[in-house]
Image: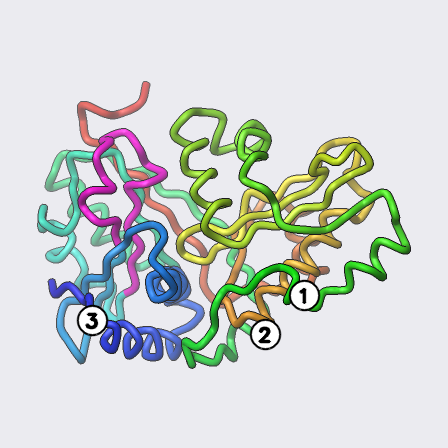
């Protein structure tokens, strides 16, 4: 595999991946963040260049020091020929199969190669899937790569109108000081590793919330290193009041104004969340969200 670390190469890859959306969104979103400061210290590998068949995004080696940290040890993959991914994935220099890790992608056909490579390393694999939801704007993304993060004051969202209608609530950026609150209410969190991960996400990437009468967030949403929007939550007192929908609409507007790619995954059985996301202007994509969680024999959970 070839490491792409040249800005011109990364821009060319970004523009090329745009032509394979939605299947390439996991990798496309990761390359977006790499091209905009690379706050999670990720790197890009391709099987060949400039013509390529496979792209792997992974953290740089200095990031993957904790063998049990599956929030950090994440590989995101896109392939133009998923059936041929097995030999690449077997290479220990590409995937550190001695760690607990996650492999994410939007192509179910990657699974056969992942399972075969894992089996050859005596690694257990658990596969999970979810519905991928996108907007029409994302399918028409302009791959200009000229977007940049701006301050929330520059977004032009109608804060004043909103505050006049509901003066006890205020929409704004989710502060990193609320990382513990997010962690305590995230189904995949509630531990020290997830807290550190959430702090990095909120500190480096766009995250929004609705502040309630007490001055604390009553609904919030964040973004991950691949531009996936998630960790959405409303405190019980304010559920079914439209607060999450209001956060989602304004957050989506901000991302669109800044040309930041985004998408959402929702478990198929979570019909209420799917309906809420669709009401905010999303629709189900032609592919699904997939994650393969891999455990070496000595790190298999009880």
Secondary structure of the residue carrying numbered label 1? loop
Looking at the rendering, in which quadrant would you find the N terminus? bottom left
Give the quadrant of the C terminus: top left
Q: Position of residue 38 (x, y in %)?
A: 33, 57
In the rendered image, which residue does mark 3 sit on?
6
Percent across and percent down for residue 283 are 61, 65
Q: CA distance from mark 3 to mark 1?
A: 36 Å
Relative placement, left or right, of 182 versus 23 is right
Mark toward the start of the polypeptide (3 vs 1): 3
Q: Nearer the viewer, mark 2 or mark 3?
A: 3
Q: Which residues are magenta?
A: 58-78
Q: Secondary structure at mark 2?
A: helix
* Secondary structure under the numbered disc 3 in the rendered image: loop
Mark 2 to mark 1: distance in Å? 8 Å
To which residue does mark 2 refer?
Answer: 136
198 or 288, which lies in front?
A: 198
Q: Is residue 76 highlighted in magenta? A: yes
**Cα–Cα span, label 2 and label 3:** 31 Å
- Asked if the residue at tag 1 contacts the one at tag 2, i.e. Cβ–Cβ closer than 8 Å, the answer is yes
For the point 73% across and 53% down, the residue is 245
Query: With respect to residue 3, does 216 lie above or below?
Result: above
Q: Are marks 2 and 3 in contact (CB under 8 Å)?
A: no
**47 displayed left or right of 79:** left
Is 46 on the left or on the right of 253, as rendered?
left
* Residue in the foreground of this view, choosing between 51 and 288: 51
Residue at 12% x, 65% y: name it. Answer: 2
Q: Which residue is mark 1?
A: 281
């Amino acid at each position: 595999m070839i490491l792409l670390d040249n800005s011109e190469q990364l821009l060319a890859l970004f523009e090329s991946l745009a032509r394979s959306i939605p299947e390439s969104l996991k990798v496309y979103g990761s390359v977006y963040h790499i091209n905009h400061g690379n706050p999670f210290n990720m790197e890009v590998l391709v099987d060949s260049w400039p013509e390529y068949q496979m792209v792997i995004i992974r953290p740089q080696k200095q990031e993957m020091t904790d063998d049990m940290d599956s929030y950090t040890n994440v590989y995101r993959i896109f392939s133009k020929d998923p059936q041929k991914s097995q030999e690449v994935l077997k290479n220990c220099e590409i995937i550190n199969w001695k760690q607990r890790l996650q492999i994410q992608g939007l192509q179910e056909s990657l699974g056969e190669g992942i399972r075969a490579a894992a089996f050859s390393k005596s690694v257990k694999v658990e596969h999970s899937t979810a519905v991928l939801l996108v907007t029409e704007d994302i399918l028409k993304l302009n791959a200009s790569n000229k977007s940049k993060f701006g301050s929330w004051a520059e977004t032009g969202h109608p804060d004043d109108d909103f505050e006049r209608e509901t003066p006890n609530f205020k929409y704004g950026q989710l502060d990193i000081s609320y990382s513990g609150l997010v962690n305590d209410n995230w189904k995949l969190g509630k531990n020290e590793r997830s807290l550190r991960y959430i702090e990095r996400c909120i500190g480096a990437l766009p995250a929004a919330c609705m502040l309630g009468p007490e001055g604390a967030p009553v609904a919030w949403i964040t973004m991950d290193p691949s531009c996936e929007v998630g960790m959405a939550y409303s405190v019980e007192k304010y559920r079914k009041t439209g607060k999450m929908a209001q956060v989602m609409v304004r957050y989506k507007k901000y991302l669109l104004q800044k040309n930041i790619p985004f998408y959402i995954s929702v478990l198929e059985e979570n019909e209420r969340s799917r309906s809420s996301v669709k009401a905010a202007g999303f629709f189900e994509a032609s592919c699904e969200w997939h994650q393969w969680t891999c455990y070496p024999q000595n790190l298999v959970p009880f």
